[in-house]
Image (cartoon, helix red, strand yellow):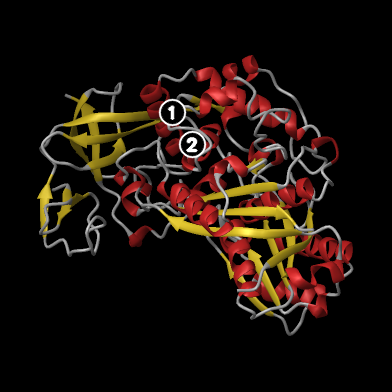
C-alpha cells in the first residue's frame, strides 16, 4: 500500500453562518486548495462528508455541486454519510483512495448547515438515526448521554464535577481558536448551575448546533514534498461499528466501536496509546470524552475522570485533549467535525496551532457516529 | 398486545428482534413476550429538550428483565432510581407520529412504558 500524506488543511468559521451547505463546502475547499497552491482540476477524487443536507435544507447531490462550483469537473466524487462520524469516515475513504493507488490527489471536504432549524427540529433530524423501537419513545442523542452519564457516575463513583471540568477545559481551549463558535471561558459553577437538559447533564455538557465546513488534501507521501514541507503522514486509520440499538450493549459505559477502531488504528500505525502526544476526541457530550479516553487505552475503565480533574488532559498537561476546544466550544457541524479534528491535528503536528500549540509528533482523532454506533480513529505523525 | 423479544436456538434474546441474532448470527424463530415481566432500572434520565411531538419532560430508562437476559429502553411514568423494580404498561401512542421527521407509516408508535411496581 502507498503511504499517505496530508498536505493541506482548512476550516471555515464555525457558528451561525450565512449561506447554505454548498457555500460552506466551497469556502473550505477553495481555502485548502489555495493554501496548498493546488488547482481544483488536478484533483483525482473529491469526497464530501455530510450527514443530512437533504433533511436540513432539501439539497442533495452535494459532491457533484461542489465539483462544479470549485472547478473540479471530471474528478470522481462520492458523499460519505456516517452520521456524526461522516468526517472520520471521509478520512478513511480519502486515505483508501491514495493507499490503493486509485487516486494521486484527493480532496476531502466535510460540512453541515444546521442553525436555520430550531433546536427541536435539528435534534429530531439527528435522532432519526435511531432504531424505530428507540425513536418512538422520543429518545434523542442528548438523552443517551444522560443515561450513560448516570451509569458512569454510579458505576465508578466519579464526582459530577469531573464532567463540568471537561466543559471548563474545552471552553478554555476554544478561546484561542479563531474558528470556534464559542470563545469564552466558563467556570465550574457556571457549568454545574446551568439548566438541566438530560438529567444529570446540563446545558454546558452539550455541544451547540453549528454551521461550518473543513477540508483536508491527501497525496502519496513520496510526492508530498513537491507540494509543501508542512505535511503529516496518516500512520493508521480504522473504523468499527457497535450495536444500532444502544440498550443492547452489555455495559453502557463501554463503546466497542471506539475500542475496536482504536486497536486497529494503533496496530496499523505500529504505535500504542502512550505514544500519542495530542488527541481530538468527540466530545459531543462531556461524558463522551471520558468514554473515548478509556476505550482508546489512555486510562483504565472508570479512571478518565481523574485525569480531567488533575489537569493531565489540559493544554499544558501530559496528554492534551481537544486543544481545538473540541465539539463543545468549537461547535459540531455534523459532517465537518471529523474533518475539523484532522485539521487541528495537522495544525499541531506542523507547528501552526498558534497559542494552542503543544509539543507533538503523534496525534490522534476519534470521530464517533450515532451514540458510538460507528466510529473512526485516525493516527497522524509528523511527515518529514 | 405483546412486548416481543426475538429468541435464537442458542437461547440469546434481543428486544427488538433482528433478522439474525446479534450475538451468534442464527435466525430468531421464537419470541418471548416480556409484557408481564418485571424489570430493574439499569440507568435513567429525564430529557427537558425533546423533539416535536414528544412529551416534555420525557423520563427514559434502560431496564433489565429479571427472568431473562435482555435489556430494553422505554419511557417511564413516575420517578425511578437505579435498581428500582418496574413493570411494562401498554400505551397506544408514545409520541405524535405526524410531528417528527420520520414517515408515520414506516413504524409502530404504540408500545410499553415502565412504571414503578
Please, which residue is most extreme toward the bottom here?
A: A74
Mark 1–mark 2 distance (CA, rounded to whole Å): 7 Å
Q: Judge whether A181 appears above or below A267 on screen.
A: above
- Which image quarter: residue A61? bottom right
Badge 1 sits on which subunit?
A
Give the residue drawn at x 49%, y 56%: A264
Residue A350, percent from left and from top:
81, 50
Give the residue drawn at x 37%, y 51%: B97
Badge 2 sits on which subunit?
A
Seen from the viewer's position, the closer of residues A331 and A44 is A44
Quadrant into which the N terminus of chain A falls: bottom right
Q: Which residue is mark 2?
A: A294
Residue A188, percent from left and from top:
63, 17
Quadrant into which the C terminus of chain A falls: bottom right
Give the residue drawn at x 81%, y 79%: A42
Q: Which residue is mark 1?
A: A302
Q: Judge whether B102 appears above or below A289 on screen.
A: below
Amino acid at each position: 500500500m502507498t503511504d499517505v500524506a496530508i498536505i493541506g488543511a482548512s476550516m471555515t468559521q464555525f457558528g451561525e453562518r450565512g449561506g447554505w451547505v454548498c457555500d460552506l463546502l466551497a469556502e473550505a475547499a477553495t481555502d485548502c486548495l489555495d493554501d496548498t497552491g493546488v488547482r481544483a482540476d488536478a484533483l483525482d477524487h473529491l469526497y464530501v462528508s455530510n450527514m443530512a443536507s437533504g433533511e436540513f435544507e432539501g439539497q442533495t447531490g452535494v459532491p457533484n455541486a461542489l465539483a462544479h462550483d470549485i472547478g473540479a469537473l471530471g474528478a470522481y466524487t462520492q458523499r460519505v454519510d456516517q452520521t456524526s462520524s461522516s468526517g472520520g469516515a471521509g478520512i478513511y475513504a480519502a486515505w483508501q483512495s491514495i493507499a490503493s493507488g486509485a487516486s494521486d490527489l484527493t480532496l476531502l471536504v466535510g460540512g453541515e448547515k444546521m442553525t436555520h432549524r430550531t433546536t427541536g427540529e435539528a435534534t429530531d433530524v439527528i435522532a432519526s438515526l435511531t432504531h424505530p423501537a428507540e425513536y418512538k419513545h422520543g429518545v434523542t442523542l442528548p438523552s443517551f448521554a444522560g443515561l450513560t452519564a448516570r451509569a458512569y457516575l454510579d458505576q465508578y463513583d466519579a464526582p459530577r464535577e469531573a464532567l463540568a471540568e471537561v466543559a471548563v477545559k474545552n471552553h478554555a481551549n476554544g478561546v484561542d481558536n479563531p474558528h470556534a463558535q464559542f470563545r469564552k471561558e466558563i467556570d465550574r459553577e457556571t457549568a454545574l448551575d446551568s439548566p438541566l437538559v438530560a438529567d444529570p447533564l446540563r446545558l454546558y455538557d452539550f455541544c451547540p448546533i453549528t454551521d461550518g465546513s473543513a477540508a483536508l488534501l491527501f497525496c502519496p507521501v513520496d510526492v508530498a514534498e513537491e507540494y509543501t514541507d508542512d505535511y503529516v503522514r496518516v500512520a493508521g486509520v480504522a473504523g468499527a461499528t457497535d450495536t444500532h440499538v444502544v440498550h443492547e450493549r452489555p455495559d453502557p459505559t463501554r463503546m466497542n466501536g471506539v475500542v475496536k477502531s482504536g486497536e486497529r488504528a494503533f496496530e496499523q500505525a505500529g504505535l500504542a496509546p502512550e505514544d500519542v502526544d495530542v488527541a481530538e476526541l468527540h466530545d459531543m457530550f462531556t461524558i463522551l470524552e471520558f468514554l473515548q479516553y478509556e476505550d482508546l487505552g489512555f486510562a483504565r475503565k472508570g479512571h478518565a475522570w481523574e485525569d480531567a480533574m488533575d489537569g493531565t488532559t489540559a493544554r499544558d498537561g501530559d496528554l492534551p485533549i481537544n486543544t481545538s476546544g473540541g465539539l463543545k466550544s468549537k461547535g459540531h457541524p455534523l459532517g465537518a467535525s471529523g474533518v475539523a479534528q484532522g485539521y487541528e491535528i495537522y495544525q499541531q503536528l506542523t507547528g501552526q496551532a498558534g497559542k494552542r500549540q503543544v509539543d507533538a509528533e503523534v496525534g490522534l482523532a476519534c470521530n464517533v457516529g450515532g451514540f458510538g454506533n460507528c466510529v473512526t480513529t485516525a493516527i497522524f505523525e509528523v511527515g518529514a | 398486545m405483546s412486548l416481543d423479544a426475538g429468541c435464537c436456538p442458542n437461547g440469546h434474546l434481543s428486544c427488538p428482534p433482528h433478522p439474525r441474532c446479534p450475538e451468534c448470527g442464527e435466525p430468531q424463530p421464537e419470541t418471548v413476550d416480556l409484557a408481564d415481566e418485571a424489570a430493574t432500572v439499569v440507568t435513567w434520565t429525564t430529557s427537558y429538550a425533546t423533539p416535536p411531538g414528544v412529551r416534555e419532560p420525557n423520563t427514559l430508562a434502560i431496564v433489565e428483565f429479571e427472568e431473562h437476559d435482555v435489556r430494553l429502553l422505554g419511557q417511564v411514568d413516575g420517578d425511578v432510581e437505579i435498581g428500582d423494580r418496574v413493570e411494562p404498561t401498554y400505551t397506544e401512542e408514545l409520541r405524535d407520529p405526524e410531528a417528527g421527521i420520520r414517515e408515520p407509516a414506516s413504524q409502530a408508535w404504540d408500545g410499553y412504558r415502565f412504571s414503578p411496581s
